[in-house]
Image (spheres, rainbow, N blue to C red):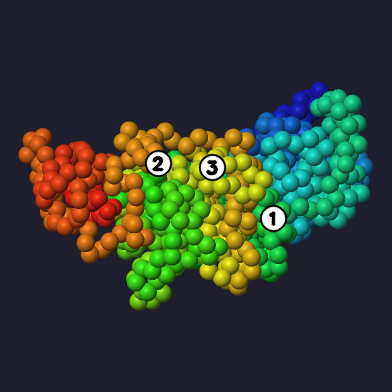
Amino acid sequence: MKRVLARFAAGLLLTGAVVAGGTYAWLSGVRHDAPPAPVIVFSPEVQDRNGLLLRSFPLADGRWRLKAEAAKVDRRFLDMLIAYEDKRFYAHGGVDPLAVVRAAFQLVTEGRIVSGASTLTMQVARLLEPREERSLAAKLREMRRAIELEARLSKEQILTLYLALAPYGGNLEGVRAASLAYFGKEPKRLTLAEAALLVALPQSPEQRRPDRAPDAARKARDGVIARLNEDGLFGTPEAELARNAALIDRRLPMPMFAAHATEVALRERPAAGVQRLAIDRGTQDRLEDLARERARTLGEGVSLAMMVVDNGSGDILARVSGADPADKDRAGAVDLTRAVRSPGSTLKPFIYGLAFEDGIAHPETLIDDRPTRFGSYRPENFDLGFQGTIPVKQALQLSLNVPAVALLQGVGAQRLAARLSEAGTRLILPPGEVPGLAVGLGGVGVRLEDLASLYAAIARGGEAKALRARADDVATAPANAHRLLGEVAAWYLAQTLAGTPPPHNALGGRIAFKTGTSFGYRDAWAVGFDGRRTIAVWVGRPDGQPVPGMIGRTAAAPLLFDAFARLTTRPAPLGQPPRDALVARNPELPPPLRYFGRAGGVSVGTGPRIAFPPEGASLDQDGDGPLALKVSGGRGGLTMLVNGVPAGGSVRGATLFWQPPGKGFVRLTIMDADGASDSVTVRVR
């Protein structure tokens, strides 16, 4: 008998060894022949500058599948998931032998399936290769695929696949899509009740959907809480609090900030899985809330657009076009920040800036606002009245038309257009037209984003810099661009605009701003800046129809001030005066700068003319000596300005001498006793 038992034991050992050896050989072969790691296609995603989700887009088949890294998912949820689904996840190789033995024993003894043996890896295998039938063969194929996955991927990678592929009802796949759709937030921070629901849903995603079967969802959630409470994962008081938590019984829309900007990003880079814009989601969110509030008060068919630009970098921090992209009555599908519209008076500051730069005017220079004809062109002020003789700064602050046209005649309409174009702004004129005096009063087409860029350049001290839409783009000035304005002229302009009277019930002196209204009440504008950011606002009908009574000061300026108030409690101060800035009252100015154009404009035929050097000349400076400047015409004493700064007092004579400030481009201006002037730009080598 003992000999028989010994032979039987030896047979069992031999059989076990053969089975173990065969199993080992089979597993080795499976692992060796495992296919490459699967490639998963995720929903395209556009993020803000800090990596926060602005908007995601569904896959071609309508599913939402967002990449979810374990490090960015609530740690308690992960612990609950593993404790509930696969306690030995980090110990097995894809198949848990203990779970298989337990499930088989229960099936034999109970006559039915009491518990499954699927590991998280096996569930990932099933999600990657769905099986239609529930059979032993299908289960074995699932086990084999799980072993193959374990051979190619780390545990964290397998867990990441589960977090991205697990079904959560409808067209939701993955924990991120579910958390955003059911809770309206990323799964980084979840309550115990929320985590329990997300653990329970993948087992029966359609039968437990909280938006369609809230009772089943609650029962499943509470079942997870009860079981994990028994396992000691958390305490009874916390479990009771979670069971009493309200259940979300509706599905929320997916996040959609900056609808137009994100659509443009996807259209430009359709193959990019994740893109990052320069937009700040917090800034965008606050301005979208403001847009929704104001849209209800604007009237039928009237919409709005806003942009926020960081002065230093040129980053577009927010881009808002309308209150709702789905609002057909307000053409919500149209990106109004890129629409070409008439700018009204918003280009006037750049006329004044060039006049400051050329040295033909100073903020304290007196100028006439009285009926004046410029050839066949006779501009009128908005209120049809005239102010008489006033300081130049006040003429800009009151947005008077006659002084602006007089100064534009002095600096040149085509020169203004060229300077704006060199700064990156595209001016749209009718076919065959050239810039004329009407450009200064809105007779040209521009975009809101162009105005935001131009005003940010003023805040930046006159430096032109292209707007940056993407966080990974390099901010550069436009190709072959020059400065928009000299530093002194930009500072004069900023200080002048800071004195513009604020809209009703707003505090003045906190931001520099300008409003504008296009002909026929079609466009209302307000653009302003502090020392940190620039905000541009447009209000009007997208179809270009007039809105009687709509003007920039009452329709757009309040929006501008509210936008600043939502972003900061105290606007950043403007810059300090440059070294060469002339801070003086009118009587203290050089005589030619005290009064501009007694006839309402610069005299064209009798003023001084620079005979040498010609426009665009290159001058070689030998040593440190002065250079000659020859002048013809002019009345009385002549005042010379170098880069807008007076170079000595009033002198007489046909030849004057000036000292270059250094190598590079220099703007030379000559002004006679009547205020008539001529300017050239030369290069000193």
Circle 2 is placed at which residue position? 491
Marker disc for residue 544: none
Q: Nearer the viewer, mark 2 or mark 1?
A: 2
Q: Residues within 10 Å of mark 3 (few under 14, many from 20)?
A: many
Badge 1 local density, few (<14 within 10 Å), some, or many (20+)? Answer: some
**Residue 245: which quarter of the image?**
top right
Q: Please state the horizontal and vertical placement of residue 506, each as a whole percent of the image.
A: 64, 44
Residue 63 occupies which quadrant of the picture? bottom right
Q: Provide the secondary structure element on which disc 2 rests.
A: helix
Q: In this figure, which residue is indicated by the disc labeled 1? A: 294
* Towards the viewer: 304 or 321: 304
Q: Tag 1 or tag 2, which sits nearer the N-term? A: 1
Residue at position x 31%, y 36% in the image: 580
What count of labels does the image hold? 3
Q: Is residue 234 above or below residue 273?
A: above
Asked whether residue 475 is in view, the answer is no
For the residues labelled 1 and 3, the Cα–Cα distance comes to 21 Å
Q: Secondary structure at mark 1?
A: helix
Find the distance from the CA under tag 2 to the CA under tag 1.
33 Å
Q: Label 2 sits on what residue type?
A: Trp
Answer with mark 1 or mark 3, whichever residue precedes in sequence.
Answer: 1
Q: Please report the residue visible at 58 percent of the width from the left and 67 percent of the height from the top.
A: 521
